[in-house]
Image: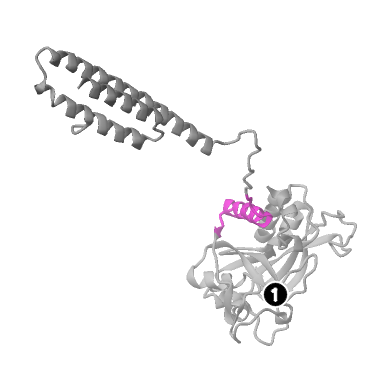
Amino acid sequence: MRNQLEEIRKSALENIKSADVLQDIETLRVKCLGKKGQLTSILKQMGKLSPEERPVIGQLANEIRAKIEQAIEEKTKEIKAHEQEKKLLAEKIDVTLPGKTVKMGSRHPLTVVLDDIKEIFVGMGFDIVDGPEVELDYYNFEALNIPKDHPARDTQDTFYITDNILLRTQTSPVQIRVMEQQKPPIRIISPGRVYRSDAVDATHSPVFHQIEGLVVDKGITFADLKGTLETFVKRLYGEDTVVRFRPHHFPFTEPSAELDVQCFNCHGEGCRLCKGEGWIEILGCGMVHPDVLRNGGIDPEEYSGFALGYGLERVCMRRYDIDDLRLFFENDVRFLKQFD
């Protein structure tokens, strides 16, 4: 029996030493020390021994069990450490390599300026409203005092879906929609995309953005319009901004005017951007025509109002000294990065 125990010890220690995965260690543990293992089988035979041999064989068996258990424990730690090292090597990060830069986007310059414009008008008590880009002919033209045979339609040629449905040429249709749904006092701006069949150049595009403004209340005069616009322009461009109001004609306002700012490129001397005039038209404005008020369901004998409309792109060009409107739509990252 002593020889059998020594053989179990020798075989177990050798197998444990050569094992390289935890599953092999567990198999050896069960084979040697389990309830049906080799060592347990030997111990079950101790009843056949003489009283003098039992304590000797029992002590030897316990020593062999302890050695095997210690060898299993040490080998288990060794295998786990080795596996951990392999895992770390496989997952290691070379911190000496440069990191990958995460490119962050930023707001488009048109969005930056639009947000500033909204903040200025909201600060003056205006609400912001929206309207459809695919519009009815009635709201885009007829309700704004532009019947089908009016020459103003030639300058606002647009893209027609049907004879009565088109892509809006201006945000002015929002005026009528608001007046139909809300009675005075009204104080709103409506920014949005508009469409016209214009040739592309430094100051024109077939797709651009416009912001409509409308105020309707009792006792509104041209002085209110002038004060509102001067406040707006100086808040947007700076207190030293030079502006002028120039008489004009719009079918939906009477009297009407255009607001110009001195050319930021040539400062009034004349250049390609301002077409030699020294001034850049920013917006059109005027007192709401009585017929437009009636079309919106408002009595012009009781109420008056003013309206304004301007292109966001031109305002943005003046703000950042940009001399070509096409840059806004070409998605050139070199240009857009300037506004990060």
Q: Is residue 80 left or right of residue 321?
A: left
**Residue depicted at 51% across the width and 65% down the height:** 184
Q: Is residue 140 left or right of residue 297?
A: right
Depth check: give the residue in front, 52 or 339.
52
- In the rendered image, residue 290, in percent from the top left (x then y), is placed at 61, 75
Q: Is residue 215 left or right of residue 315?
A: left
- Estimate how packed mark 1 is, as few (under 14), some (14 to 19) or many (20 or more) residues with alpha carbons within 10 Å: some
Q: Quadrant of residue 317?
A: bottom right
Q: Secondary structure at mark 1?
A: loop
Q: Which residue is mark 1?
A: 196
In the image, residue 82 above or below residue 164: above
**Residue depicted at 61% across the width and 81% down the height:** 142
Depth check: give the residue in front, 257 or 235.
235
At label 1, the amino acid type is Arg
- In the rendered image, residue 18, in percent from the top left (x then y), is placed at 40, 30
In the image, residue 162 above or below residue 126: below
Magenta: main secondary structure equals helix
Question: Could you tell me how many numbered marks the image carries?
Answer: 1
Residue sitting at the far top: 52
- In the rendered image, residue 106, in percent from the top left (x then y), is placed at 64, 50
Q: Quadrant of residue 93?
A: top right
In magenta stretch: residue 318: no
- In the rendered image, residue 38, in percent from the top left (x then y), is placed at 22, 30
**How was the colour assigned to the protein in this rendering?**
one colour
Q: Quadrant of residue 50?
A: top left
Q: State the extent of the magenta-drawn residues as a range.
A: 105-127
In magenta stretch: residue 110: yes
